[in-house]
Image (spheres, helix red, strand yellow):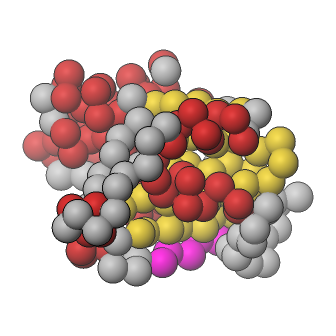
Amino acid sequence: MANSLLLVGVGGQGTILVSRILSEGLVEAGYDVKMSEIHGMSQRGGSVTTQIKFGEKVYSPSIGEGEADLLVAFEKLEAARYISHLKKGGTLIVNDEEIYPLSVLTGNADYPDKVLDELVEQVDNVKVVEASRVAEELGEPRCQNIVILGSMVKVLGLENIDWIELIKKNLPERVHEVNIKAFERGLSQ
């Protein structure tokens, strides 16, 4: 049986980079992996989704409503937007961050209050990650995605893969140290 992971975020958050690192690690661990990316208006702050399935044999990366074992949201509103894809008993990892969509920025809509509270009411297994706070503490706001990667690895029980080497392989050398720290912080949350 395949594990189904849906990663959702906003353009510029590094959702696709995390998906690629995760997929590489799963392949190296011997899993059959299928990944599909949907960029949408990612360059303009729009939704970005990645569907990943891994297991002994996987035929398609497609994840329909109620099929994701794990929903990983890099932003709270994206979690609410895709929550219907999480299966009953599945796990939600959500970054405690708000990125205002264009409709909110232009004053045509309000960012919903209490998004996290509503998600916690709907889902039994919720892990809130304060990736932006951790990234700020590390002095590098762009490493939030790697904090989330660490959290995912912990939830999935995949600590036996050499994630540090994969981070080094996929990121420029000048940011290795901070991203390794970010990963370790995510792993320990």
Residue name at image x 68 percent, y 73 percent: 61
User: Which x, y percent locates residue 16?
Assistant: 41, 64
User: Which x, y percent locates residue 124?
Assistant: 76, 33
The secondary structure that most of the magenta stretch takes on is: strand
Q: Can the viewer see residue 33?
A: no
Q: Quadrant of residue 177?
A: top left
160 and 101: which is toward the camera: 101
Q: Residue furthest right?
A: 1
Magenta segment: 34-38
Q: Quadrant of residue 104?
A: bottom left
56 and 115: which is toward the camera: 115
167 lies above or below 140? below
116 lies above or below 184? below
29 and 135: which is toward the camera: 135
- Left or right: 169, with 81 as reference point: left
Q: Can the viewer see residue 142?
A: yes
Asked if residue 35 lies in the magenta stretch, the reply is yes
User: Which x, y percent locates residue 157?
Assistant: 67, 33
134 lies above or below 105? above
Asked if residue 102 lies in the magenta stretch, the reply is no
- Left or right: 130, with 12 as reference point: right
Residue name at image x 48 percent, y 19 percent: 188
Residue name at image x 72 percent, y 41 percent: 122
User: Which x, y percent locates residue 153?
Assistant: 56, 37
29 lies above or below 138? below
Q: Quadrant of residue 17?
A: bottom left
